[in-house]
Image (tube, coloured by chain):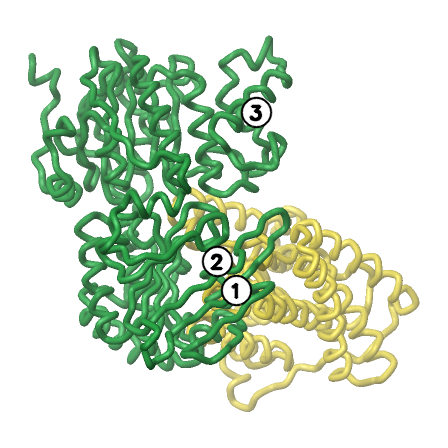
Amino acid sequence: MQQNPTPPRLTLRGITKQYPGCLANDDVHLDIAPAEIHALLGENGAGKSTLMKVIYGLVKPDKGEVLWDGLPIEVKDPAHARKMGIGMVFQHFSLFETLTVTENIALALGDDAGELEPLAIKIRTVSEKYGMAINPDREIHTLSVGERQRVEIVRCLVQNIKLLILDEPTSVLTPQEVDTLFITLRKLASEGCSILFISHKLNEVKALCHKATVLRAGRVSGECIPAEEDTTSMAKLMVGDDTPVSTTYPKRLGTSPLLSINDLTLHSPDPFGVHLKNINLTVNAGEIVGIAGVAGNGQEELLASLSGEHLCPVANTICFADTQVGSLPPDQRRQWGLGFVPEERLGRGAVPEMSLTENALLTGFLTGLVNNGMVAWKKAEAFADEIIDRYKVKAAGRHAQADSLSGGNLQKFIIGREIMQNPKILIAAHPTWGVDIGAATAIHKALITLRDQGAAILVVSEDIDELFLISDRIGAICDGALSPIKPTPESSIQELGRMMAGDFEQPANERSAAL
Amino acid sequence: MDIDLITNILYAMIRTGTPLLIVALGELVCEKSGVLNLGQEGMMLMGAVVGFIVTLLSGSLLLGFILAMVAGVLMSLIFGLITMELSANQVATGLALTIFGTGLSAFVGSEFVGKPIEGLDPVFIPVLTDLPIIGRMLFGQDLVVYLSFILFGAVYWFINYSRPGLILKAVGENPHAANAIGLPVFKTRYLAIIFGGAMAGLAGGYLSLAYTPLWAENMTAGRGWIALALVVFASWKAERVLLGAWLFGLASILHLVFQGLGFSVSPNLLAMLPYLATVVVLVILSSNQTRSRLVAPMSLGNPFHARG
């Protein structure tokens, strides 16, 4: 590599960034050659986000140098980065929902955007050229998550782009969509564009990337060529030697039905919502059922009807064992023994402005933390401390506000809070979303333990690897309809991918079929 | 009802609606950027008193109007500094600004109460002014009314067709995303706040220099609040602000109309109409989740902290 006469597209030398109480980047070096797809691997809080914000001019490093095509440069702000040819696709999309695709892209292009009509034509051409067609006249709020990501990518492609940064781009896509994205990225790289692919999914990095730089606790812990490594060795670089990285869990068959959904059809009040269509599902005591699906296919609505946020018109559409709970509000379902981990952490899972103790109390009040209407603060604090301790939640303490925690740490806290109440039924949406490998393993183990104690667990997730790892039975939801649920060993990623795309016959109600 | 009465009602409707239109256009732009400034009333009062004093002392209406706008801008800058630099709560700051403006204008203007000035005269346009019914309404007004037509056109075009207008909407919807793609969030919000201040000052000046050419304590009589309601009533659309301002103008002269027709209805009851209309619109808007989600600027009232 040293004989390479052309300088790297981008070089970082000794980048250091200190935040109050946290050294986000510590002497980080990175080289990305032209036409190279470079992976930046690391767990949550390893410093990936800070590093890419440095590259994109959103954060000024305390120390260190950035070289662009071999020349030192200071990236002043995102507009400057864009002028240099750096494009960025954020994990949380920076799109404006009430504006059209063209307007969104025009905004990002700055003064170079020109008139909207020629731009719309250009968007159409570019998006088709790279195999991800989008209609430039649609308003963003009408698009699916996958389509929004395309808008973000096309937004970078209509400019003269030399370096494309993607932050965890596959977390919102179906396996098929991931394949399409990879084809696009490879084509882009073959035309000379460098790509920085930020991820913690080792299989994807192995499949796509030419080189990888691994960050751990703000420092570069290693560099490798992913194709020549196996995923375990890369995982070791990410998490260090002391954390076990790959495990399999024994599959179980449950005993008797604990959660059953019977012919659940629910009309969503939101015109952009998904209507649930005749859903039938049984989760037995002592098993984990996993439901895959691309975001926005009815997961939210299904979860809302199970938690009690949306009540069902007919009480027996949802039963906990023999109790009909379809028309019971959330607190009564919890009293029965329901634990619930919602998709939205801030707002549904936790109150952002409240402390961890108060948030622990919010669903933990049934476990003796409230006596005759009075809060037992000592117990509540002890409960919060125990969650923080057992699930290794990184926080300033039990007094920390929920919104001061990083997403992954708050997720650990919420999951911990629910599991530690020993629910009979646990419904968890995206249980390890944004959580690092070490903590994800801990959450998985806790779920398995809970299952082995006889709880019925329903996991709704977009992470297929996770579903195959922990589910005893697996299925998918698409456009408000639920696929048949199969024992995990009899299913495959390909089959599940087809189901996520809606390729299945919806099963009839087991009870009514039996009659 | 005879033609003359209708002509006069329409004329008075526009005249009464003009200060509402001007201040509401300013607030519309301000809210589009995600900033809720409840200080309209205070800024208007400061505009009114400064405009009046300047004109009284200098004899120049033009200078009066200009300094009325300057006064509005200075007031809005106080709001801007507190909410933008210090990230204070916009609602509390806006309320404080109104209270401050009410008190300060009364203090500054105490010696000028009841003094007479020569107000702004209407400017007639040949032929057009003589058109039946709408002639007087649209073309028999003073220059500030004509200016308000132009301002409406400019704001309408700006919001719907210009690139800076697109940036304004983007910042108001999601300032963090706007910042991430390199749009100037602070600058946009400041400019929107300043525009709002200038418009409030102008509207205040209109009251004390043209509408009723004199200064009286608290002479805006709640028009700043009506303008705030008006922006909601208009569901943040410029064309509906225009319509609403004139409708609210009509509502506030209705008691005169009824008098003319021989009814007697308490003017206090009629004065409620704009607010009642706003509540009705709010109920209609919020009865539909999607509409209420998409219609208001999404970050309205949320301070923006640059991260990093």
Which residue bears the numbered disc 1? A14
Q: Is residue A167 visible?
A: no
Identify the colour of chain B in the image.
yellow
x and y percent of residue A315 in the render?
28, 17
Please name the amino acid that badge 2 sits on: Asn
Circle 1 chain: A
Q: Quadrant of the C terminus of chain A?
A: top left
Q: Residues within 10 Å of mark 2 (few under 14, many from 20)?
A: many
N-terminal-most mark, 3 or 1: 1
x and y percent of residue A386 in the render?
53, 22
SS class of the residue under badge 2?
loop
Which residue bears the numbered disc 3? A385
Alpha-carbon span between mark 1 and mark 2: 34 Å
Which residue bears the numbered disc 2? B174
Identify the colour of chain A in the image.
green
Viewer-side residue, A369 vs A212 = A212
Please name the amino acid that badge 3 sits on: Asp
Left or right of residue A31: residue A366: right
Q: Residues within 10 Å of mark 1 (few under 14, many from 20)?
A: some
